[in-house]
Image (cartoon, rainbow, N blue to C red):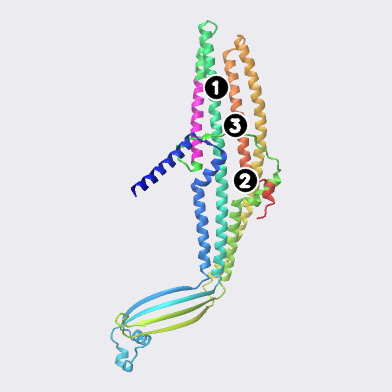
Amino acid sequence: MGGSMGRVWWAVVLIWLGFAAGARAGVLELEKAYQLALARNPLLAAARSEVEAAQHGVAEAKGAFLPRVDLRLVYARTDSPVQVFSYKLAQENFKAEDFLLPNLNHPEDYTNWQTQVVVTQPIFNQGREILGYRRARIALSQARNYLAAITQRVLFDTERAYLELLLARERVRVMEEAVRTAEENLRVVRSRFQAGRALKSDLLEAQVFLSRQKKDLAAARHQARVAETRLDLVLGVPLTTHWKLAPVSGLPRVREGLALWRCAALARRPDLKVEEHRVKLAALRVKEARWRFLPSLNLRGIYEKNAEDPLSGGADGDAYTIMAQLDFNIFKGFRDKARLSRARAEYLSARERYRQYRREVEQQVEEAYSRYLTAQKEYEVTERAVAQAEEGLRIIRQRYEAGLALLVELQDAETALKRARLMRLEALYGWRLAESGLRFAAGIMGRERISPAEACHEKP
């Protein structure tokens, strides 16, 4: 037994070490990030539990159609004339002397042990069973769509955190290059100062410029660490996990028009379907309030056994009763009428909220589509800006080396190139994130990469 437990312990340790090594040294691709988030994100686990709870709710609602069986045990000891008379009859223990007036009016204490088995079969209880089952089915669909909505959100957050971490690390790389350039400039200026070909103010300016670059590098590294913890949070892993990310290649391309994206959103957005189910539940409450005016019908069967002392084998008797109970709703102080009016008002409110939410979904798609087009144009502009900044720096460096330009002009050109490269990076990742946001707004954020046209014409 000890050897077996030891092997299990070492297996657990090896698995943990393997995961830790993979977390530190392995390359995390976007597809793997999706898998981790779907498997470990707590919000998804909570949504799956809600689906499971709704499934049990459907089973519970089905059970309302089946007969109910109750076992009832009652012990009683009394000297009440009515109860003593009834118990003796039920025990089949009534004798002639029990008709004497003193015995009827002043009976001795009497004991009864009653055992009842009650079977109730509901037939129609103002539609509670039928409507309860329908409500449970709608709640299950609502829970599944909520799970789909959370899945969409987690996938989008995963991709956004992944891209933001890539961007943050690219910023660090650009800033490290800027620091190296500033250090090289300082070396050149110090050499020229020692040779008497540069002023001390140039040396001081180069040192200050290097300090500023190092400060920006420290800030960029801080932002990269924050972005990494944000990715860890979405993936559901410890916040101390370090990742080596695989780059995202290629440029985002959207060829479909706005109409198809809007159509896909109205057909696929799971959160919109959740709102639609709220309207269905409100309509069901109206029907439930209307059916409160109908009668209720139930069948009931009772088998009972009454004994004076079931352990000593004294007097006992048994009997059965079969009954059908029909209840009519005549008057309840206008509560049913008020309930129906309230349910109708709540239904109208839910319907209008759903209409507004549909409009908001359309607006979100249009905003995401416009953001994508804008991000594409911004990237094209920054591409040209980088080319211009590189050419400008080349010219200024040649002039400075020839003694025709000041150090501040060289530093300004280097700063302009750094900013242009950062703007291009931010524009590129902003473009990719805008495409992800458009897919998220259309409800087709996922690993299968379904097109808006397919989602738009997909059967529900």
Amino acid at pointer 2: Glu
User: Which secondary structure class fits the magenta region best?
Assistant: helix
Labels 2 and 1: the sequence-earlier one? 1
Start-end of magenta stretch: 211-232
- Please tell me the numbered disc located at residue 250: none
Q: Image point 58% across, 21% down: which residue?
A: 415
Labels 1 and 3: the sequence-earlier one? 1
Q: Quadrant of residue 380?
A: top right
Residue 430 image position (x, y, % from top left): 61, 35
Q: Is residue 367 left or right of residue 325?
A: right
Q: Nearer the viewer, residue 200 or 122?
A: 122
Q: Which residue is mark 1?
A: 178
Q: Is residue 239 visible?
A: no
Is label 2 or label 1 in front? Answer: 2
Q: Quadrant of the C terminus?
A: bottom right
Query: Is there a contact, CB below 8 Å, between mark 2 and mark 3?
Result: no
Is residue 216 located in the magenta-colored stretch of the structure?
yes
- Please tell me the numbered disc located at residue 448: 2
Amino acid at pointer 3: Glu
Is residue 108 located in the magenta-colored stretch of the structure?
no
Q: Which residue is mark 3?
A: 426
Q: Quadrant of residue 105?
A: bottom left
Is label 2 or label 3 in front? Answer: 2
Amino acid at pointer 1: Ala
Residue 447 image position (x, y, % from top left): 60, 44
Q: Is residue 4 visible?
A: yes
Few, some or many residues within 10 Å of mark 1 (<14, 14–19, 20+) = many
